[in-house]
């Protein structure tokens, strides 16, 4: 019976894809963090 | 003599006006003067020795280490630090963000002087400086060399920056018609300048592509031109923050009151831009590190030095910029800007000097003469910068 072969993430492009995903997630978070928060948005609706 | 009469009068009056403007003003015994004058004079003497007896008489350069501090700091680092001019002109004239109009003139002047002085400093490092005009006059153009691109770009960019700055000179001389004509050239020149900057900032990185066997693998990459370009953006922004902070204090009386109110807002805007650019740069470095599978290289001193540069002087200042912007802390932003500048200096010196011939038994270390000449270039630039801002309406907005 063939055993399951684990892929070494260090020898593939897997880590690079993961890093890119992390980059976009963190970049989105950074842009949101640096965007000015709307002041008193509830008050405006009322 | 009335300034208007002096300028619009006869040639004699105009000449007299220029002579008056060239005369030094203000107190002589300032801390900066006391430090800079001896350094500049010593530097001039060292340069006389360098041109009479050759590079070997004053530098620690050799056939193995042909590029030292003069090339690594004055040219490779200095050009990155002058990147603020193309970033700000892009933001103001192309993106139409009026908030930064107040700092356009002083930033362009900084860029113009940086290129003029660092370009001139390149002559000190050339073994045969009299051959420097060859790429321009056609005596051996050298099309296949990256330096050919850099030579032409330096020249054209200096002309472009001079045209961008020329309305200030026209305003200083009260040449209203000339100012109107020159202002119409600004947008075209800005677009040309941005194009040239993007190419030669990355071109300076491309210079090191062929030195793969000589540069430590942690600093050499096939994407080094892109890294140089991206890092020049935040280097320029950090330089504007540092220079703006110093100018705001030293030349306070020359800055119009309305600009004082916008100063903090401008600094926060620049910090935001720097945070985002540094974040992108950091991930580019991380991606290249993983792509080249360089984990094993972190185990020695070079690896630690690399981490100091990338984490200590890229990631941490990036986070500080973001934190300072969010919490409106100008002090944190100023510290982050200084750290970012140190990081750029470290990176450029690592590529061009420190990790160059990293395997050699004897490492290059600049001689005291090289350090003095480098300081001479920096101080001379500050002297000329001071002359411009105390004579011309550099801190005024152009609209």
Image (cartoon, rainbow, N blue to C red):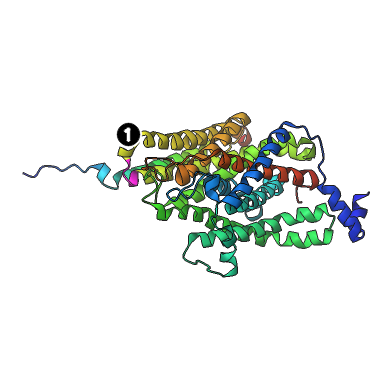
Instruction: Write down the quadrant of residue B245 in the picture.
Output: top right
> On what subunit does the disc labeled 1 rest?
B
Name, please, the residue furthest toward the bottom.
B138
Instruction: Write down the quadrant of residue A6 in the picture.
Output: top left
Query: Where is residue B235 drawn, in percent x and y?
Result: 56, 43
- Residue, disc 1: B299
Task: Name the residue located 62 percent from the left edge and 44 percent from the top edge.
Answer: B46
Please tell me whether residue B292 belongs to the stretch shown in magenta: yes
Task: For mark 1, give the secondary structure.
Answer: helix
Query: Where is residue B239 drawn, in percent x and y?
Result: 61, 41
Q: In this orientation, does residue B76 appear?
A: no
- As drawn, is B199 to the left or to the right of B295? right
Q: Nearer the viewer, residue B362 or B146?
A: B362
Q: Looking at the magenta stretch, what is its main secondary structure?
A: loop
Task: Name the residue located 38 percent from the left edge and 44 percent from the top edge.
Answer: B216
- Magenta stretch in the rendered image: B290-294
């Amino acid at each position: 019976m063939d055993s399951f072969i684990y892929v070494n993430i260090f020898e593939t492009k897997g880590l690079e894809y993961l890093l890119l995903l992390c980059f976009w997630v963190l970049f989105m978070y950074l842009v949101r963090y640096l965007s000015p928060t709307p002041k008193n948005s509830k008050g405006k609706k009322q | 003599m009335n300034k208007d009469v002096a300028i619009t009068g006869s040639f004699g009056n105009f000449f007299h006006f220029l002579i008056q403007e060239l005369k030094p003003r203000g107190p002589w015994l300032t801390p900066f003067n006391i430090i800079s004058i001896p350094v500049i004079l010593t530097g001039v003497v060292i340069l006389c020795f360098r041109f009479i007896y050759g590079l070997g008489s004053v530098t620690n350069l050799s056939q193995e280490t042909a590029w030292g501090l003069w090339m690594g700091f004055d040219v490779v680092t200095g050009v990155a630090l002058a990147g603020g001019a193309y970033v700000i002109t892009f933001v103001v004239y192309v993106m139409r963000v009026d908030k930064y109009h107040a700092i356009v003139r002083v930033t362009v002047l900084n860029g113009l002087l940086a290129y003029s002085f660092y370009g001139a400093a390149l002559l000190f490092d050339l073994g045969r400086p009299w051959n420097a005009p060859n790429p321009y006059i056609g005596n051996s153009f050298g099309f296949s060399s990256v330096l050919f691109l850099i030579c032409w770009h330096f020249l054209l960019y200096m002309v472009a920056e001079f045209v961008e700055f020329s309305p200030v000179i026209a305003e200083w001389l009260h040449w209203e018609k000339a100012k109107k004509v020159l202002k119409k050239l600004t947008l075209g020149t800005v677009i040309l300048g941005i194009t040239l900057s993007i190419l030669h900032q990355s071109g300076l990185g491309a210079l090191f592509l062929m030195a793969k066997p000589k540069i430590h693998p942690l600093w050499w990459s096939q994407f080094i031109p892109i890294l140089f370009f991206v890092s020049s953006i935040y280097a320029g922004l950090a330089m504007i923050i540092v220079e703006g902070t110093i100018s705001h204090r030293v030349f306070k009386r020359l800055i119009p009151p309305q600009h004082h109110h916008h100063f903090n807002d401008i600094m926060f805007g620049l910090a935001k831009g720097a945070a985002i650019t540094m974040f992108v740069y950091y991930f580019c470095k991380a991606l290249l590190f993983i792509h080249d599978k360089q984990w094993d290289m972190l185990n020695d001193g070079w690896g630690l030095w690399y981490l100091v540069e990338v984490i200590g002087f890229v990631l941490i200042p990036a986070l500080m910029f973001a934190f300072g912007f969010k919490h409106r802390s100008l002090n944190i932003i100023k510290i982050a800007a200084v750290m970012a500048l140190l990081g750029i200096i470290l990176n450029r010196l690592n590529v061009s000097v420190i990790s160059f011939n990293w395997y050699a038994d004897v490492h290059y270390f600049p001689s005291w003469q090289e350090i003095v000449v480098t300081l001479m270039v920096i101080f001379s630039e500050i002297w000329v910068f001071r002359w411009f801002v105390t004579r011309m309406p550099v801190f005024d907005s152009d609209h």
